[in-house]
Image (spheres, rainbow, N blue to C red):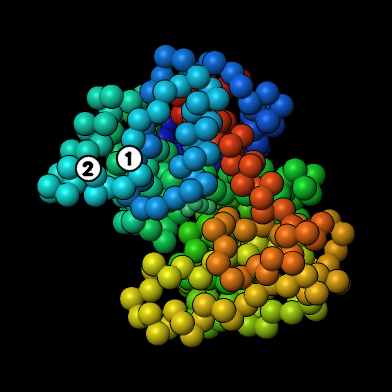
Amino acid sequence: MFTNRSLVSIANLTREDIMHLIHQAEQFEAQPNRTMLSDKVVATLFFEPSTRTRLSFETAANRLGARVIGFTDPKVTSSTKGETLKDTIMMVSNYADVIVMRHYLEGAARYAAEISPVPVINAGDGANQHPTQTLLDLYSIYKTQGSLDNLNIYLVGDLKYGRTVHSLLMAMRHFHPTFHFIAPRELAMPDEYKLYCRQYHISYVEHEDFNAGVIADADILYMTRVQRERFTDLMEYERVKDVYILRAQMLKEAKPNMKILHPLPRVNEIAYDVDEDPHAYYFEQARNGLYARQAIIAHVLNMDL
Ligand code: CP
């Protein structure tokens, strides 16, 4: 299913692979505490900040009985002395059975997977991919909609730098979605992903307006944060950072089944009054990350249930 048992890109997964991992996640959710990895060590190498991805991976490993090593800040590692990514990966693979890595460079995960003797799980590489987020997003969509097929999925906000929306778009090619891209012109979905849609016969509509009428037909409203850390021009960031804010009053025409997802962290793009609305699902979505990541760790170690 995965290249060298590593998970680098969501693009490698078939429909059957995705459904298999979703059903594995269901089983882990039914019983999260299992000691099936008591002889394993999981390394978490975070070259970029994270709350959910790192903590849910570490919780997943702990609930499976594995031990965890790693770092949350590259400044405390020998990369500050000039050690290369290659040497870091070769060293850590001496100590751990699987490496979970977040890196600021696009392609870093693929490179690590190519040289590593142990499986590498991409926990986000620059603006490129975030495949484990996508698997938890797919699990969340499946749980709330009962199916992944034929859904209207609205992606809102930073569609240029948002690696989670790029990965979700690619994964959904197996499930006949209709996408709606809602972004200011500066943060529009890049042409390469629109080309991908055309190549895989995925319907999409682009919008610049964001209001109750535009989102009335959504099954999934996927909000994203404008990613300050990816901008070279901070004036441009200031111009676009608050363009779209979802407020509770905008949900009056929403379909009953509609759920609001967000990979989190949020900044201003979802007002706090939305948290109490029955359409809000982002905190449950983050919890689903634990079960999806248990399924992924078990899978790359060839220990599916
Ligand atoms: N969704 C996500 O990747 O969150 P973190 O950056 O906190 O890991």
Q: Can residue 138 be spotted in the picture?
A: no
The amino acid sitting under disc 2 is Thr
Q: Can residue 213 be spotted in the picture?
A: yes
Measure the C-alpha gap from mark 1 to mark 2: 8 Å
Q: Residue at x 59, y 18 (%)?
A: 34
The amino acid sitting under disc 1 is Phe
Q: Please state the horizontal and vertical placement of residue 73, each as a whole percent of the image.
A: 31, 47
Q: Residue at x 46, y 15 (%)?
A: 38
Q: Which residue is mark 2?
A: 77
Mark 1: few/some/many CA within 10 Å (<14, 14-19, 20+): some
Q: Which residue is mark 1?
A: 71
Q: Residue at x 59, y 71 (%)?
A: 268
Q: Residue at x 22, y 38 (%)?
A: 88
228 left or right, relative to 108: right
Q: Residue 1 or 260: which is nearer the viewer?
A: 260
Mark 2: few/some/many CA within 10 Å (<14, 14-19, 20+): some
Q: Please state the horizontal and vertical placement of residue 140, each as a whole percent of the image.
A: 69, 46
